[in-house]
Image (tube, helix red, strand yellow):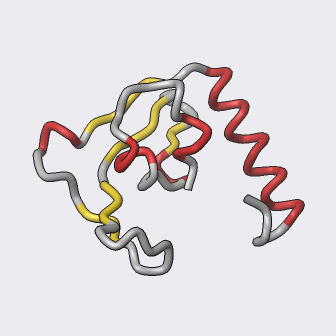
Amino acid sequence: MIGKLTLSNFGPLPKYQAALKWDDLDEEKGSLLVTKTLYNPNNNINKYQLLTPKTSGSIRAIRIHERLIKMLKRHAEIKLQKGPLYR
């Protein structure tokens, strides 16, 4: 999930940020596509669900700065180098 790196950059609620996946990043358009929300009523990291938002207005593309795209790409590179235990 890429939500942690975007917390201070744009306005979706944390439940939308936590549901972001790498596939939601569109580098060419410079945007993130918000299409899901994190549902985790028992706060159990192993038992969460990614659901569609309650309203269709919550589904949207959010423009992000080129600098954030570069940061995300660098983060992905490091994650690949360090393996699955990297957080």
Left or right of residue 21, residue 38 in this image: left
Residue 19 in picture, x, y percent from top left: 42, 55
Quadrant of residue 85 within the rendered picture: bottom right
- Residue 6 percent across, percent down from the top left: 54, 35
Would residue 38 be found to the left or right of residue 82 on screen? left
What is the count of numbered marks?
Answer: 0
For the N terminus, the image quarter is bottom right
Direction from residue 28 to residue 50 in the image, left or right = left
Decide: is 48 above or below 32. Answer: below
Q: Residue furthest front?
A: 42
Most extreme residue toward the left is 55
Residue at (49% x, 79% y) in the render: 46
Q: Is residue 84 above or below residue 82?
A: below
Q: In the image, is 76 to the left or to the right of 55? A: right
Q: Nearer the viewer, residue 10 or 70?
A: 10
Residue positioned 84% across, 51% down in the render: 78
**Residue 10 location, x and y as percent?**
44, 25
Check the image and name the residue furthest to the right: 81
- Res 56 quadrant in image: top left
Q: Quadrant of residue 70?
A: top right
Above or below for 83 versus 66: below
Q: Quadrant of the C terminus?
A: bottom right
Residue at image location 20% in from the left, 52% down from the top:
53
Give above or below for 45 relative to 70: below
Which of 45 and 5 lies nearest the eye of the viewer? Answer: 45
| Residue 74 point in image, percent of width and height | 78, 40
